[in-house]
Amino acid sequence: MFFLLSSHTSVVPHTLSRRRVLQTLGATATASGLIGTVSGRGRSSTARFSAFNVRDLTTEQVQTTGDEQATAAARVIQEVRPDVLVVNELTNNLQEGTATDRPNVDAFVDNYLSVPQREGLQGIDYPYTLQPDSNTGVLPETDYDFNKDGTAGERPGDAYGFGFYPGQYAFAILSRYPIERDGIRSFQEFNWADMPDSRIPLAGDDDVQTEPSDAMYLTEDEADVYRLSSKTHIDVPVEIDGTTVHGLFAHPTPPVFDGVNNFNGRWNADEIRFFADYVAGAEYIYDDSGVAGGLDDDASYVLLGDMNAGPEADRPLDPATTYLLENDDFDTRRLPTSPGGAQRGNPEATATFGGGSQVDWVLPSPELSLRASSVVWPGSDASKRGLGEDVRTASDHRLVWADVATR
């Protein structure tokens, strides 16, 4: 397990907790718009949390200036000005093996985010950054044919997470508040089989097929080493004006590109379930340092990232509904909306593929107060500043944010 920290089935049941009691006290005053209201931003205890999938932003793009996609992504971020931000699909160049004098997350800050990208915008300096290792493109020490194509030990299909090289599709965390380094817990190496009642499609199970050729499954030997996280799951505590808020970051595998066993759909569902169990204090969980157990019952947290899941009827497992929307451990009373999504018939949409999907999430724990939230998907009348073009150039996803009052 390695990360770079720069100073530049059912959820486990809860007993009655401080979190549940305080849920009724967390005032919600959400307003939506192109960028949204900044209600509460003047309060020192209110922080803006944001998730943005930038669609495979590479080392070559961020280590130099002038890249069109990186510039557009920075413009969108500078419009919103998050305090805590996760950038999904930013290559981890340290894993990739590319020789540079700084990690990609810091290069993105130095070359793009700290430099005004449009007249009237200001640069943002993120003094605290984190570049966790990702399972994408990482092969086990022993060769396995995970994707059952007849050849073992070849990327991308036989890696722990789909990637043509180590660190592809990784994510980075950027914060204007101090990261509590000693409190970070990563779960990159957690074994899928160690989740009770996991959905692993295991050869020999009655509902698992080993034919035809697109029937993905795991043998018992493969299940002994197969990791749950397709990238990583990580808990990063941030100190916001004397209050610790745990940022919970993940990017589960897409529940598509599948065969008869719904391998990726099952995998995605259990990746999402992991953090639902974690905030419920599940005892089966262990981190990469060997420390067991879930999150403390009185902890505050925000779940951020591209979960590759929304409440969609064509997803038979529908983990977003089970583990997020219908889970009292997350505040889902008001979800971010967007003018552009509304014009397309889905105001909660956060991605353009498939006509728009609610796959990117920023969900606080219920005792935190949600002050405002939005999805940066401009409507047809909101392109005067060029933002409509920027969001299309930056990604096939849309940035999602929420203002959360910590006390």
Image: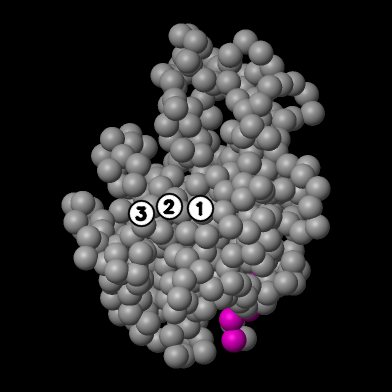
Residue bearing mark 1? 69
Please give the range of residues in magenta: 237-241
**Res. 393 mark:** 2
Residue bearing mark 3? 350
| Closer to the camera in the image, 321 or 336 | 336
Name the element at disc 2.
helix
Query: Does 38 appear above or below 314?
Result: below
Q: Are marks 2 and 1 in contact (CB under 8 Å)?
A: yes
Name the element at disc 1.
helix
Residue type indicated by callout 1: Gln
Q: Residues within 10 Å of mark 2 (few under 14, many from 20)?
A: some
The answer to whether residue 178 is seen in the rendering is yes
Question: Residue 98 location in percent, x, y?
Answer: 77, 44
The answer to whether residue 194 is seen in the rendering is no
Q: Residue at x 41, y 19 (%)?
A: 260
Residue type indicated by callout 3: Thr
Instruction: Looking at the image, tell me whether mark 3 or mark 1 is earlier in sequence order.
Output: 1
